[in-house]
Image (cartoon, grey):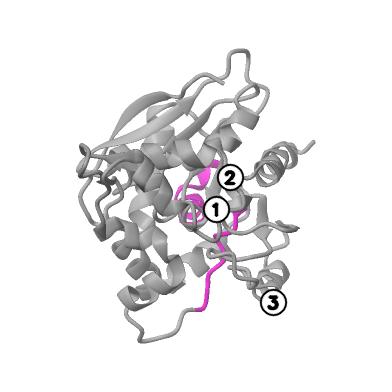
Amino acid sequence: MTKPEPVDVEVAGGLLRVLVHRPEGEPTLPPVLGLHGVTASAMSLQPVARGLVSETLIAAPDLRGRGASGQLPPPYGMGVHADDCAAVVRALGLDPVIVVGESMGGYVSIVFAAKYPELVKSVVLVDGGIPLPLPPGVPPETILPLVLGPAIERLSKTFRSVEDYLDYWRPHPAVSEGWNADVEDYLRYDLTGEEPHLRSRVSKEAVEGDFADQLTYPEVIADSLASLTCPLHLIRATRGLLNEPTPLLPEPLVDSWLERLPQLTVETVDDTNHYTLMFGERGAERIVQAVHAIAGLASGD
């Protein structure tokens, strides 16, 4: 697969970087908008793009405050990301798109589809997008380290070299067993600065702002999800962000939304965690297959 083309799209406050994977031949699927997680970047969509680029264009933005969009200012939050996504889709002339939302990208996908239904054909959610019940009155800064662990801790650290950064991640319980070239490429892309003072390109302010937004306005995601009429497909992992046996999206919670949304379908990929579902070969393959299936469903085939 050739390297993606970096494209800058004008949004509120500056330029949003988008990695565009263009097909060599005539597209046979609708274009795909790929949205990453809360401390991630567009490079987390690389495994999925590799599986789809022979059939369609994939546009993966570095969401505001991440990657090459790290310089974009606040405000943050799902609604702001949704507005940025609309700018991307319109600037690249992609509407309507199939949205693939990984982790926090799933929640952005839901709000985006609700705010801009004319731009969205269907949505594939990857271990995200279903509103999570969070403990009331607990500050986001208290919950964040417990939920994200090294992923949030790294934002306050500097690293002597690229290898030092890779070594920081190698023991991570969720990626150690599925370590591969895609993980390494993702981590290299995450770095900025000069040795021996390398650091992540993810803004801690952006992560905290997005997390606080979900805590403060949980009804935005729930109301957005309830309002959708387009086809929705959720892919779940069986384990959590730190490889714990409890999944991020428990089955009773998902079942409650299945009862409310007739257009929602759900599958669980056995023996995966929140990270290997996106970076592992089996997980990426299931996401690609889901895009094929939901494209046919949206077109009435």
Q: Which residue is mark 3?
A: 252
* Foreground tag (3 vs 2): 2
Q: Which residue is at the front of the view, 133 or 93? A: 133
Q: Which residue is at the front of the view, 257 or 117? A: 257
Q: Residues within 10 Å of mark 3 (few under 14, many from 20)?
A: few
Q: Residue furthest right?
A: 301
- Report, in whole angstroms, how far the alpha carbon at label 3 lies from the one at label 2: 26 Å
Q: Position of residue 293 (x, y in %)?
A: 75, 41
Q: Position of residue 38 (x, y in %)?
A: 41, 56
Q: Magenta stretch?
A: 109-133
At 60% from the left edge and 29% from the top edge, which residue is drawn? 50
Q: Position of residue 62 (x, y in %)?
A: 37, 41
Label 1 sits on a secondary structure element that is: loop
Quadrant where the N terminus sits is: top right
Return the disc, 3 or 2, that comes first in the chain's sequence. Answer: 3
Return the disc, 1 or 3, that comes first in the chain's sequence. Answer: 1
Whether residue 130 appears in magenta in the rendering, the answer is yes
Q: Amino acid at mark 1?
A: Val
In the image, residue 159 above or below residue 188 = below
Which numbered dot is residue 241?
none
Q: Which residue is at the front of the view, 262 or 246? A: 246
Q: Which residue is mark 2?
A: 279
At 63% from the left edge and 69% from the top edge, which residue is drawn? 247
* Foreground tag (1 vs 3): 1
Which numbered dot is residue 175?
1
- Report, in whole angstroms, how far the alpha carbon at label 1 lies from the one at label 3: 27 Å
Q: Residues within 10 Å of mark 1 (few under 14, many from 20)?
A: many
Whether residue 132 appears in magenta in the rendering, the answer is yes
Quick check: 231 left or right of 201? Answer: right
At 53% from the left edge and 69% from the top edge, which residue is drawn? 131
Q: Which residue is at the front of the view, 200 or 100? A: 200
Snapshot quadrant of residue 219 = bottom left
